[in-house]
Amino acid sequence: MPSITTTDLSTPPSTTDRPRGPRAKPWLTLIAVAFGLFMVGLDGSVVSIANPEIGRDLNASTADLQWVTNSYLLALAAALILGGKLGDRFGRRTFYLVGVAGFTLASVAIGLVGSIEGVIAFRAVQGFFGALLMPNTLGMLRAVFPPRKFGMAVGIWAMVSSVSTALGPIVGGLLVQHVNWESVFYINAPIGVLALVFSAVVLPQSKNAAAADESFDVVGVVLLALGLLAVVFGVVKGETWGWLSSGTLGSMAASVVILLLFGLHETRTAAPLLPMRLFRNPALTIGTVITALNFFVLLGVIFFVMLYLQNVRGFSPVEAGVRTLPLSLTSVVASPLGAALTARFGPRLTMPLGMALQAVACFAMLGWSAESSYTAMWPPFVALGLGVGMVMASSSDAVVGNAPVQDGGVAGGLQSTALQIGGALGTSVLVSLIGSRVGSTLTGELTGAGVPVQAAQGLSEAKDAVAMGVAPVSGEMPAQLKAAVVEGSHQAFMNGVHTSVLVAGVLCVVGAVVAAVGVTGRQQP
């Protein structure tokens, strides 16, 4: 791949309705969007802590709990670019406020609904309003900050996201343990109200004035939504249907066809939903891919780490949250550090370095066992947090910073779409790898731990529970047999974890090479 120098594609102010007047204050804008960003980030990390309790309280299956996450991801992925486009055209402030209000109301509804089907449905509603909120945070920052300060603003944006992620496990663990699981959603209500009041006062309106007379790309909206729904649906169902099943392959093939039709349509319409010209900038394109890979690793690893800490090691939600603090806190430090290094040396340093740190973290997890001490856990957490924070800042700057100002919301939607699809892929693919490895090794591990062959073969039916870190024991089992089942089940789970982190580590190495070779130089304001 040839070397490429990043360039700024910003258009002259005459083509964009830049925010003006007393509200056009960059730092107040950053504080205002931080409230909404904090709420979404906190919600994302507390749900993983609350899932086990949701399952027990609502008698939800493992598949149900996956849909608590996946319904949110499907709605979010399908609407993110639409949310950014609506903000660019009709007003980023308007759609940010609508997103905050809807997200807050959906959060309260999740706590009140009282059924797993209702939780899944309102999580989808929450995802849709999150799609209106998220891309317009970056779009507003792109509009109010001058190019020389935009990298710093993105670094702080990424830091806020990291802080909310860091607090999520602690806050969620305390609420689940001492109040109830519903309270992890109710907490969004005061944050959302504060965000609405403060944002309504200080946020400037910004939009692409040139788009006011353009027709809206309804065909593009429908094609993109269907294409993204098909790919995310295929990914999340691939684990249960099988990756080579007709359903999975059919969904993936449909997504490819629909997205190709979308791309063809976008090149022929006068007012495209996602301007294909954005991808002429290789730094933006590679930044999008690295964003997806970053969250593939982060969300996939966090998902099984929480299973490991709570179901294998037996820690409470609070204890599990405390033990993952090194990951979250180091990502807080790494985000502004990554922004500063990107501003000074360019993304060719920070993106590969971040991916390399994540590779180190994944390969270090190959040494974990069902009885590992915490001294073996925290170094990979630190490396992963540093890598994620550094990549988040540099890739966000590469995507949004290299887009024209009038397309800031669309670029924010593109970056957020890559993030969410990467997260959906990471959770589904890595958990699927764990399940596959557990299925192939469970019987052997059980017999190796001392379980009689006939009993081990019967327990192999419980492979789905073992893939979640749960040993299939019952109160009627003799103590010696119970201990052997626990030992064999946990070893089978760790076999799956090792396969997953090996795959994730190799992908990180590939990402580091692509970023190092494909992007060079510095963004020129």
Image (tube, grey):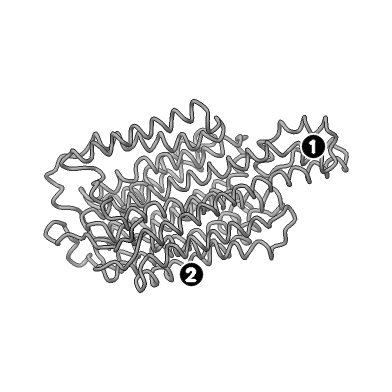
Residue at 40 percent of width and 59 percent of height: 515
Q: Which mark is residue 360?
A: none
Q: Position of residue 456 (x, y in %)?
A: 79, 34
Q: Nearer the viewer, residue 225 or 122?
A: 225
The number of numbered discs placed on residues in the rendered structure image is 2
Residues at marks 1 and 2 touching, judged by CB atoms closer than 8 Å: no
Quarter occupied by residue 241 = top right
Q: Quadrant of the N terminus?
A: bottom left
Classify mark 1: helix, strand or loop. Answer: loop
Q: Amino acid at mark 1?
A: Ser
Q: Residue furthest bottom?
A: 344
Identify whether 316 is placed above or below 148.
above
Q: Is residue 517 left or right of residue 426?
A: left
Q: Marks 1/2: CA distance?
A: 45 Å
Which dot, 1 or 2, sits closer to the camera?
Answer: 2
Query: Measured along the vertical axis of the image, is residue 237 above or below residue 377?
Result: above
Q: Which residue is mark 2?
A: 333
Lateral position of residue 163 relative to residue 37, left or right:
right
Report the residue that reaches farthest toward the front.
2
Location of the C terminus by quadrant is bottom left
Mark 1 and mark 2 lie on one chain; the one further toward the N terminus is 2
Residue 103 image position (x, y, % from top left): 40, 47
Please say if 85 is above or below 14: above
Mark 1 surroundings within 10 Å by alpha-carbon count, few (fewer than 14), some (14 through 19), many (20 or more)? few
Provide the secondary structure element on which disc 2 rests. helix
What's the amino acid at mark 2?
Val
> Which residue appears farthest toward the top when viewing the image?
246
| Residue that badge 1 annotates | 474
Task: Give coordinates of residue 47: x percent, y percent.
Answer: 53, 48
